[in-house]
Image (cartoon, rainbow, N blue to C red):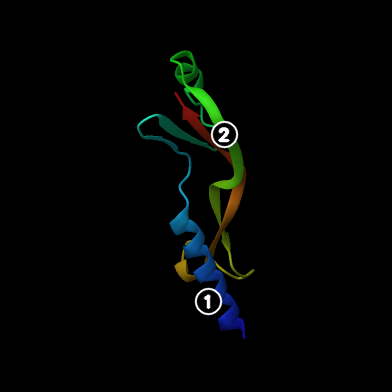
Amino acid sequence: MKQYKKLTYIFLIFFLIGGCKNSEKKIIEKENSLEIVVSCEEESNLEQYINDGWKIKKEYSEEKVCSWKTIAATKDCDLEKDKGCKIVQPDKMGEERIYLLEK
């Protein structure tokens, strides 16, 4: 049972790490629309687009993990010697904001 629980934690950690990046800003441009994604309190240049004539069509946000920390799986785990007993868990949570703009 203990091994099953540990394997489940490890699988969950790799799944979460594989799907997330620390901070990112993406800009996806199509013909007359633009999507700007700003993660983890990163500055956006949204005002520049608004000044250029773009209008915010839709805006929404989602909670996101901004950073991760490594902890020991058990009390007697030595993180320096035993690499197999490390568990990675969320450290800081933040917000990912998505702006849909159109001309």
Which residue is drawn at the image coordinates 45% and 47% (left, top)? 21
* Element type at mark 2: strand
Q: Are marks 2 and 1 in contact (CB under 8 Å)?
A: no
Between 13 and 63, the one lying in front of the other is 63
How many marks do you count on the picture?
2
The span from disc 2 to disc 1 (Cα, nearest Å) is 41 Å
**Disc marking residue 80:** none
Which mark is on residue 7?
1
* Residue in front for this viewpoint, 94 or 100: 100
Percent position (x, y) of residue 53? Answer: 46, 16
The type of residue carrying mark 1 is Leu
Where residue 50 sits: x, y (%)? 49, 18
Say which residue appears at 48% left-offset and 13% top-offset. Answer: 51
Residue 87 in sight: yes
Q: Is residue 83 above or below residue 50?
A: below
Q: What residue is shown at x 54% (from left), y 30% (from top)?
A: 57
Of circles 2 and 1, which is in front? 2
Quick one: which residue is furthest to the right in this view? 75
Q: Quadrant of the C terminus?
A: top left
- State which quarter of the image contains the N terminus: bottom right
Residue ID for mark 2: 58
Q: Mark 1: which secondary structure?
A: helix
